[in-house]
Image (cartoon, grey):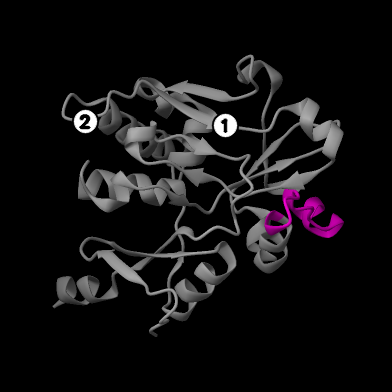
Amino acid sequence: MVNRQYPLKQDVTKGDLLSAYVVAPFDEGLDVLRQNDYKLISSDEQGVLRVQEGYTADVSKFGNWVLQGPLYRKNERTLLLPAGLPLRHPVDAVHAHRNYKEYIPSDDDIQQAIAEGLEVLPKDVDKNGNIVVPFKSIGSDKYGMFFFGEEGTDTEKSKKAQAYGDWIVHQNNPYRIKDFVVLLDNQNYTNEVGTHANQFWLWWLENGSELIGWNWELDYANRVRGVRKNLTEKVEEKN
């Protein structure tokens, strides 16, 4: 389906996953993806596509919103969620950011998310409250496996996460990247403004492939990237 205001651009056309993106506010970008049978890409899926497509491909050279998101809890530890809460009510989340406010999810959404989330422990963050993991050992780190391990056993997740880490630190990478960094709101800020949720933005390689979880930019016209299974290629393989 063609959206004249926010056209969809498909740039990954081979392999197990197809990928396309639209430059739009988060809620409207999601609508375009869904109308064309795409779902929002996860960081682990993007890692796979970056390795597949190479350092100079758009999927590597540009950043975009990804599936995962943080839940910041007042007087409690931050949770990393496999699917960010703004996805459940994207119009409300965009409205909050458009008005320079944090997105506050419902109590029901928060309670459901608690069971799914990975707690960020105080000992695991640096002095600024951010997660920093060396890419060379990302496959043995729980946060690395969470963001780049996809599904499967812990061994499978570790292997997949490390494949992305090895690709990042490879000598052929024109960008010298050492650490995987997850930028988070600090606890003092959360205690002041209250419980709130966000989506992660995965930066391009030139910006270190960082994940940003503290922006107010869901209302901006940014890249919203989607993926879907390449069913055509599967049929050709069977034949």
* Residue extent of the magenta highlight: 97-113
- Relative to 196, is 131 on the left or the right? left
Q: What's the residue at 23%, 76% (across, down)? A: 232
**What kind of element bears circle 2?**
loop
On residue 119, which mark appears? none
Q: Say which amino acid is labelled 1.
A: Leu
| Res 151 visible | no
The answer to whether residue 138 is left or right of residue 16 is right
Marks 2 and 1 sit apart, C-alpha to C-alpha, by 23 Å
Q: Nearer the viewer, residue 34 or 159?
A: 34
- Give neighbour class at mark 1: few <14, some 14-19, many 20+ (Cα, 10 Å): many
Kindly check if marks 2 and 1 are in contact, taking CB atoms under 8 A apart as contact: no
Secondary structure under tag 1 reads strand
Residue 180 percent across, percent down from the top left:
44, 28
- The answer to whether residue 181 of the structure is visible from this angle is yes
Tag 2: Cα neighbours inside 10 Å, few (<14), some, or many (≥20)?
some
Residue 233 is situated, as x and y percent measured from the top left of the image, at: 20, 71
Q: Looking at the picture, which amino acid does disc 2 mark? A: Asn
Q: Earlier in the sequence, mark 2 or mark 1?
A: 2
Residue 173: % across, % down: 21, 30
Residue labelled with disc 2: 173
Quarter that holds the N terminus: bottom left
Whether residue 103 appears in magenta in the rendering, the answer is yes
**Quadrant location of the C terminus?**
bottom left
Up-down relation of residue 9 to residue 71 (above or below): below
- Residue 183, label in figure: 1
| 67 horizontally vs 227: left or right | right
Q: Looking at the picture, does residue 158 appear above or below residue 92?
A: above
